[in-house]
Amino acid sequence: MELILWRHAEAADTTPDLARELTHKGRRQARDMAAWLTGQLSAYPAGAVRVIASPAVRTRQTAEALGLPVEIVTHIDPDATADDLLAASGWPDSHNVVILVGHNPAISALAARLAGAGGASVSLGRACAWWYASGADGALVLKTAMTPALLHRAT
């Protein structure tokens, strides 16, 4: 299984929280990261990618930039824990590539746990994606950590 943790892109600071939409910058961040992910995922067979997102508008908008079906999982809302995210992803038992679009602090806590950071703090910035895979020996491998700023430096 491969797991991509993707924090939602920049959203407006409005209420209610679940209705917050992406800003213009956030829509660009989501579009750019989705384009990069799509290019990386082109080697995988059709149907091998499962995209899950919280019910918040900002995560749905971020995920929809991929142009793939998005499964809304209500229990990975902004108040979810890293354990909630892990359970929703099916890690490590799924045979799919799972893209999980979520919120801080849970998505950063899960990234830290998977990276073996122990008690150290890790923070996924807005629209950042961390891609994990199971190695040949069963060890967890961080394949890449991509940020919107890195995408722009590459072009």
Image (cartoon, rainbow, N blue to C red):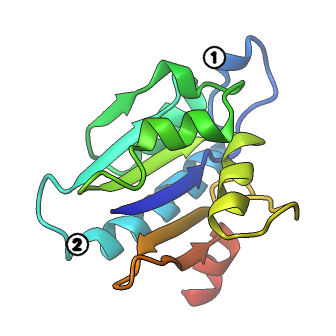
Q: Quadrant of the N terminus?
A: bottom left
**Residue 32 versus residue 11 in the image, above or below:** below
Image location (x, y in percent) of residue 139 = 48, 78
The residue mark sitting in front, 1 or 2, is 2
> What residue did someone put label 1 on?
19
The label on residue 42 is: 2
Percent x, y of residue 42: 22, 72
Q: Amino acid at mark 2?
A: Ser
Judged from this view, the residue extending furthest toward the top is 16
Q: Residue furthest right?
A: 120
* x then y, percent, for residue 16: 74, 11
User: What amino acid type should be assigned to the residue bearing mark 1?
Assistant: Ala
Q: Earlier in the sequence, mark 1 or mark 2?
A: 1
* Left or right: residue 153 compared with residue 3: right
Please determine whether, in this image, residue 34 is positioned above or below residue 56. Answer: below
**Residue 30 image point, x, y percent:** 53, 52
Q: In the figure, 133 relative to 102: above or below?
A: below
Q: Nearer the viewer, residue 144 or 126?
A: 144
